[in-house]
Image (spheres, rainbow, N blue to C red):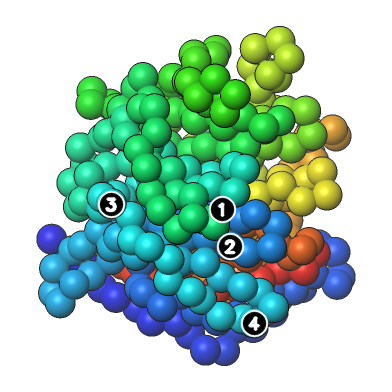
């Protein structure tokens, strides 16, 4: 297995496209070089866990968990994950971080494990497991509950959709996603959940857009992505969904594309591209700004630590 660690590029050039005021600017890089990370935010800080890294000349699954304070432009290391995981999902709920599923250490073996970190208490505990082990899935918080959708199970792609309710401390099944896939984005926006991009056994450049209505437990199709890709990050801001970066093979490439979806109009708009094309990145919104962290600048096992911030 070959891989390359690629450090942050200090100078990022803002490219104006879409709204004239929008631009990407650099912020403090992640202390580690990683890819396939999981990122979430609590509105004030950004949190990052999981992924692949390097230890010497060996592939690793770092257990270090970080919090980023945009006011100080600085990272703080929190208590390590009890287990090394790659391709996991991270959600903030009620003062805790939920690290959901993933693949164990540097393997592709999916797990159903849920680790919960009490931020104020600075301690980890094991939560109720998923019904379906999975990695390379995606999750989002919607109306106080966590939705986990898709990914790769023990026998390939799954469409399974599970919902965690903190009141009952249980997972329940919801309607399966119509298109089984992995390396996609799951974003809560308004009263819907939007699932974008991804890959399966046929393609690494899916243009699929599927929208879930929690009130009816039903799915519908949305307008296809302008740029099919996988290994993406997605966030919601001001009623829009931003789909960021990604990867594709045949040929192998990474994407700097940032595209914005309006779920009301069912239309797409091109936004300023990232200064550094990458996949396996993470994103979160803090104080009206989109923070994008880490990810591989080249397809496959490459690693980075760059952070870029968009003020739309």
Query: Residue under circle 2?
Result: 46
Q: Quadrant of residue 241?
A: top right
Q: Which badge, 3 or 1, comes first in the chain's sequence?
A: 1
Left or right, 3 with respect to 307, comes to left
Query: Residue under circle 3?
Result: 82
Mark 1 and mark 2 residues within 8 Å of each other at the beta carbon: yes
Q: Nearer the viewer, mark 3 or mark 1?
A: 3
Determine the secondary structure under disc 2.
strand
Compared with 251, 192 (above or below) is above
Q: Which badge, 1 or 4, comes first in the chain's sequence?
A: 1
Q: Position of residue 228 (x, y in %)?
A: 53, 44
Q: Which badge, 2 or 4, comes first in the chain's sequence?
A: 2
Q: Nearer the viewer, mark 1 or mark 4?
A: 4
Q: Bin the neighbour count of mark 2 within 10 Å (Cα to Cα): few under 14, some 14-19, many 20 and up.
A: many
Q: Bin the neighbour count of mark 3 within 10 Å (Cα to Cα): few under 14, some 14-19, many 20 and up.
A: few
Left or right, 288 with respect to 231, comes to right
Left or right, 63 with respect to 96, comes to left
Q: CA distance from mark 1 to mark 2?
A: 6 Å
Q: CA distance from mark 2 to mark 3?
A: 20 Å
Q: Which mark is residue 72?
A: 4
């Amino acid at each position: 297995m070959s891989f390359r660690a690629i450090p942050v590029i200090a100078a990022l050039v803002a490219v104006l496209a879409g709204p004239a005021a929008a631009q990407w600017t650099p912020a403090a890089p992640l202390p580690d070089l990683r890819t396939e990370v999981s990122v979430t935010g609590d509105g004030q800080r950004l949190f990052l866990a999981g992924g692949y890294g390097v230890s010497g000349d060996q592939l690793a699954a770092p257990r270090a968990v970080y919090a980023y304070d945009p006011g100080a432009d600085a990272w703080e290391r929190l208590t390590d994950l009890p287990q090394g995981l790659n391709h996991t999902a991270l959600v903030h709920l009620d003062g805790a971080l939920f690290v959901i599923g993933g693949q164990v250490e540097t393997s592709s073996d999916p797990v159903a494990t849920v680790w919960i970190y009490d931020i104020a208490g600075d301690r980890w505990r094991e939560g109720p497991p998923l019904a379906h082990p999975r990695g390379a899935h995606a999750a989002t918080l919607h109306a106080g509950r966590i939705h986990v959708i898709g990914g790769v199970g023990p026998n390939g792609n799954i469409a399974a959709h599970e919902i965690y309710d903190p009141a009952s401390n249980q997972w329940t099944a919801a309607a399966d996603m119509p298109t089984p896939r992995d390396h996609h984005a799951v974003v809560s926006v308004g009263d819907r959940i939007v699932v974008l991009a991804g890959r399966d056994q046929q393609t690494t450049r899916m243009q699929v857009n599927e929208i879930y209505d929690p009130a009816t437990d039903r799915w519908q199709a949305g307008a296809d992505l302008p740029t099919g890709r996988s290994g993406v990050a997605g966030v919601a801001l001001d009623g829009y969904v931003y789909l960021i970066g990604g990867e594709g093979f045949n040929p192998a490439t990474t994407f700097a594309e940032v595209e914005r979806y309006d779920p009301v109009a069912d239309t797409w708009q091109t936004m300023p591209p990232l200064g550094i094309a990458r996949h396996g990145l993470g994103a979160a919104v803090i104080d009206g700004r989109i923070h994008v962290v880490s990810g591989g600048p080249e397809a496959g096992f490459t690693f980075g630590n760059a952070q870029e911030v968009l003020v739309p």
